[in-house]
Every structure is written in C-alpha cells, then in structure tokens.
Amino acid sequence: MRAITVQDREAGVSGLTLSELPHPHAAENDVIVEVHAAGFIPNELEWPGTWTDRAGRDRTPSVPGHELSGVVTELGYGTTGLTVGQRVFGVTDWTRNGSLAQYTAVEARNLAPLPAGIDHVTAAALPISGLTAWQALFDHAHLTVGQSVLIHGAAGGVGSIAVQLAHEAGARVIGTGRAADRDTALGLGADVFVDLPAEGLDGIGEVDVVFDVLGGDILARSTQLVRPGGTLVTAAEPVTVQPRDGRAVFFVVEPDRVRLADLAQRLRDGRLKPIVGDVRPLGEAAAAFTPEKRTPGKTIIRVVED
Ligand SMILES: NC(=O)c1ccc[n+]([C@@H]2O[C@H](COP(=O)([O-])OP(=O)(O)OC[C@H]3O[C@@H](n4cnc5c(N)ncnc54)[C@H](OP(=O)(O)O)[C@@H]3O)[C@@H](O)[C@H]2O)c1
C-alpha cells in the first residue's frame, strides 16, 4: 500500500516520503480502515510517539497523521462494535502507524460510526480538534453557562471548534488570533475578538477559563487573566507558571467514541462546523505540512476520491 513515511528525525518535514509499505496487520481489538481522508497536526514530527513505540524502541519508518475517516475492511480477533464495510471516523494511536496511508490498523474503540450525510473530508477534520476542544472546556475546565472563556487561536483547527462549543454552552466567548481571523471567530460565535499581535492581552480583564493552544509567552501571561477559582487549560505544552488563585492544566487529548458520536451528531444537526482548509492528495502530503501560503482551517489529505 502507499503511505507517507518518516525515517530520519533530524530531517523533519523534508524527510516525509511517499513509500510502499506492507498491508497493516489487524491485532486483537483492531480494525483495518481503508482511509478515505486523513488529518495531521503540523508539529507532530516533534512528538516522541512519531519515532518510538510505547516502550521507547525505534519504530521507524513510521506513518504520521492521527485523524481519519474511512471504511472498515477487516476486524482483528475479538473486535466488536464495528463491522466490515462500516463508515467510521476517529483517532489512531500516537505510537503506531497513522492515517497518511491507504490502510491503517487502529483500535476499534478509538473510532465512531460516521453518520450518513457527512463526507469523509469533513469528518477527518473533526476527531482531534473536536475531542481536544471538548475535553479542554468541559472535562478539564468545567465551563458552564454564564461563565467567560478566553480561547486563543480561535480561528484555528482546535480553537474554531472550541468557540462553537463554548458559545452553544452559553458562555461569553473572547476569541484571539491574527487580524485576518476576526470575521471567522466572530462568525463562529465569539462575542469579542482580540487581535493578539496588535492588541496584546492587556485589555481583556479576568475570565473564568482560558483555553490556550499557543504556548510560550502567551500561555505564561494568560495565567494572570484567570479569575480567582478559575482554570487555565492548555493543549500546547506543560504549564510552568500557575494562576495566582486558580488551576492550570496541560493535557493530551484522549480518544472517546461516545464523544466522537456526539460531535458527529452536532455536525449533522448543523450546530458544529469544522473549518476545512487545504485539501490535497496523498502524494502532496509532504508539501501540505509546510505550505507556501497557509489556507485557514484544517488541512486534509484526501486518500480516496469519493
Ligand atoms: N495536547 C493535545 O492533545 C493537542 C491536541 C490538538 C492540538 N494540539 C496543539 O495545539 C496547537 C494548535 O493546533 P491547531 O490544530 O488548532 O493549530 P492551527 O489550526 O494552526 O491553529 C492555531 C491558530 O492560532 C493562530 N496563531 C498562532 N500563533 C499566533 C499568535 N502568536 N498570535 C495570534 N494567533 C496565532 C494561527 O494563525 P496562523 O495560522 O496565521 O499562524 C491559527 O489560526 C498545536 O500546537 C497542536 O500541536 C495539542
């Protein structure tokens, strides 16, 4: 089968290669999915799991990409809950070969059925962004109706979903980003937009929840915006500065079939809309990691023309 692989850690994105790999093996509780569309996170080549397995052993050449939408073609021994021929979407394991391939082996529990009426390209934009946004706002920060939330990167993959979920939950949403992101963030439900490079954080005041995906100095300075008893949650990097009288949480997204199904239902109902950006064929995946011109929204690799 054709797949995008990486072998040389030092080479970074320039080491992404279109390769021929053996068909994957379905282990116990796995399914094999024929990937129709796949998503990736631009900085995932920096993640340890791209290079080593859970025991820390080298696993190159490895296949990046951890979001997919496709069709089940095979079940491993003991696999229940999904059937051959079923349309599914979800997340692949961090320390196994991923979704930038014609086929991938993935634990069935990491996938949810894909409802009719949702195309594979749209579905592939949802798993990591959707689960990360949900888990940040509601599992870690316990955001509730009437609270205020500051969402950094509000027009990005994760932030754009977070804005929609927080707005629907009845929170007051302040989105941040660059000047060009203003209309997108406001259109998704942000009450206020802050152009970070131009306006900085100074005029924002205190909020109940900060959701950060940018890290660095923005993360550190955002701790000062957390109201007493509030929470800062970040998906970017471990937190080194704590809010004065609040919690700070760094987390890595976890697969969750039930939540994936809920997100798909919201999408089907028209209550949630992932922003799909550039859509490219598998052969152009390497170029898609470092585009000359960035298209707003989630970049998707279309593996099968539906
Ligand atoms: N821990 C986890 O489980 C987890 C899960 C998912 C994602 N993540 C991490 O979360 C981060 C964001 O992911 P994503 O998919 O949402 O990325 P994304 O689609 O690139 O979104 C980031 C957004 O923030 C904007 N931005 C970046 N730097 C900015 C700055 N200095 N000022 C204002 N706006 C800025 C970007 O604009 P431009 O495109 O114009 O730069 C973009 O709109 C990544 O680092 C990813 O690794 C972590």
Image (spheres, helix red, strand yellow):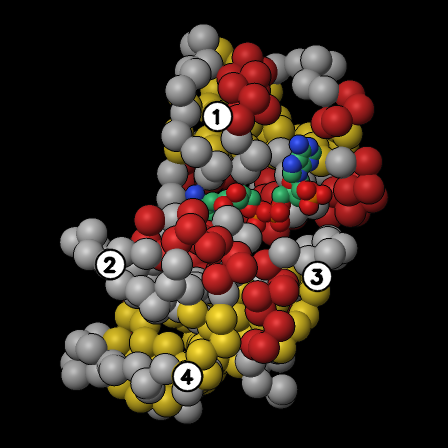
Nearer the observer: mark 4 or 1; the answer is 4
Residue 76 visible here: yes
**Mark 3 lies on residue:** 277
Q: Disc 1 on helix, strand or loop?
A: strand
Contact check, label 3 and label 2, Cβ < 8 Å = no
**Mark 4 to mark 3 CA distance (whole Å):** 27 Å
Q: Residue at the spot x=73%, y=56% of the render?
A: 292
Nearer the observer: mark 3 or 2; the answer is 2
Q: Is mark 4 within 8 Å of ligand 1?
A: no
User: Could you say which quadrant of the image residue 79 lies in?
Assistant: bottom left
Task: Kindly identify the amino acid type of the residue bearing the numbered disc 1.
Answer: Leu
Q: Earlier in the sequence, mark 4 or mark 1?
A: 4
Quadrant for the N terminus in the image = bottom left
Q: How busy is the neighbourhood of tag 2: few (under 14 within 10 Å), some, or many (20 plus)?
A: some
Residue 232 numbered tag: 1
Q: Earlier in the sequence, mark 1 or mark 2?
A: 2
**Mark 4 to mark 1 CA distance (whole Å):** 44 Å
Residue 20 numbered tag: 4
- Classify 209 as above or below 206: below
Q: Earlier in the sequence, mark 3 or mark 2?
A: 2
- Classify 215 as above or below 5: above
